Amino acid sequence: MSVLDRIGQKLLFTFDPETAHGLSIAALRCGLPVGARTVRDTRLKVSLCGLDFPNPLGMAAGYDKNAEVPDALLGLGFGFAEVGTVTPLPQAGNPKPRIFRLTADEAVINRLGFNNEGHAAAERRLAARRGPGIVGVNIGANKDSDDRVGDYERGVIRFAPHATYLTVNISSPNTPGLRTMQAREHLGELLSRVMAARAAATAQPPIFLKIAPDLVEAELEDIATEVIEKRIDGVIVSNTTISRPALRSGEAVRETGGLSGRPLFERSTIVLARMRKLLGPEMAIIGVGGVDSTDAALEKIRAGADLVQLYTSMIYAGPALPGRIVSGMARFAERENLKSIRELRDSRLDSWASKPL
Ligand SMILES: Cc1cc2nc3c(=O)[nH]c(=O)nc-3n(C[C@H](O)[C@H](O)[C@H](O)COP(=O)(O)O)c2cc1C
């Protein structure tokens, strides 16, 4: 980390996590030169679901919930940015405090509960975008909705014309009952209706399903069957975990919510590899959870990911991190004489898929 970055991070850490997050969004919105240079290298390009990603590293959902700064994120070196989760109606989310830093673990626990400004606000911003970069929109359901599947249909119809891809997020642990939509009896109906909504929409972007890391093998098999049957374009593995692996941080580890960051890497990578085994080599998979370095990003690809995302590590390492990871990938491709970073994919699939959860 550069001296400037270090000062910036120190300053942000004097604020509570949610205020610090707001300040970082404001800095990006103002166009402050907070990031690194963008690395362009043909060996890092990934073609997936008809889209051409300039590099395999994306910003995960939850940072830019209201689609305020997707192009500024792309300017930090990310190959794509996912905004949201957005719900049809604005909602406040859970009472504060609801984000906790676990500094000794380079992790975070959050129980935000889909706080966001709603569909209309995000749509207005996305419709005004000029840039050509890849921006996915992550859609969810309102906490008090009496038709949650309908909320996802509304998200598809509304954002299909503005999103390069859509993510159906049914894996947040902070909206009561949401994750039960991952169970086969609910998932089949949800995915059928989502795909019908896309067919009826004015544009047909790829649709990805974002899943939790807290699933047993039988549940993963059910999800894979439905994803294949309903012709979903890909899967994002994973959201935050409700499990608590051995952690070093004190009090904060007892907070309820979803754990993200370095301690999530192992579990989310095992689930990613198992999904790759279940879905086969053609299905698109995005690996997310605990990526904090070039090595970690490459390991997700070795375990079966086509693309990789991160969020929590940027809280600790600052906005130059994506540029550093991507230039590290380019150096790796050069050193190993790879024509494409994709050559790495699945090279450690068996070893990851055989690890116990
Ligand atoms: C503060 C915070 C808010 C998040 N909000 C969302 C969200 O709204 N939708 C979503 O799909 N994932 C959300 N996530 C999960 C991330 O997108 C990602 O799946 C998870 O944090 C694991 O990646 P990481 O270890 O790199 O952070 C959130 C994560 C954090 C830390």
Image (spheres, rainbow, N blue to C red):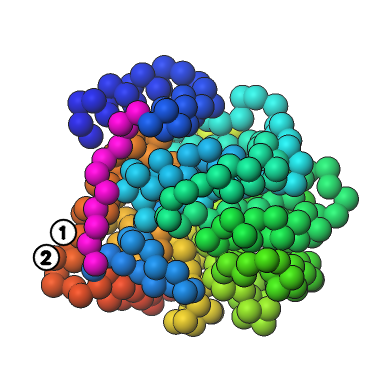
- Per the image, the residue denoted by label 1 is 331
Provide residue 228's location: percent of width, then percent of height: 62, 80
Provide residue 6's location: percent of width, then percent of height: 26, 26
Q: Residue at x 61, y 24 (%)?
A: 97
Left or right for 6, reference 30? left
Left or right for 349, reference 199? left
Q: Are marks 1 and 2 in contact (CB under 8 Å)?
A: yes
Question: Foreground: 196 or 302?
Answer: 196
Q: Residue at x 24, y 57 (%)?
A: 40
- Per the image, the residue denoted by label 2 is 335
Q: Is residue 123 above or below residue 209?
A: above
Do we see residue 124 in this rendering?
Answer: yes
Could you say which disc has been placed on residue 237 in the image? none
Question: Foreground: 174 or 145?
Answer: 145
Label 1, label 2: how far apart the Cα atoms are:
6 Å
Provide residue 77's location: percent of width, then percent of height: 32, 48
Q: Is residue 164 above or below residue 130?
A: below
- Residue type of the residue flagged with mark 2: Arg
Mark 1: secondary structure: helix
Find the magenta span and give its range: 32-42
Q: Main secondary structure of the magenta part?
A: loop
Mark 2: secondary structure: helix
The quarter holding residue 167 reads: bottom right
Give the quadrant of the N terminus. Answer: top left
- Magenta span includes 221: no
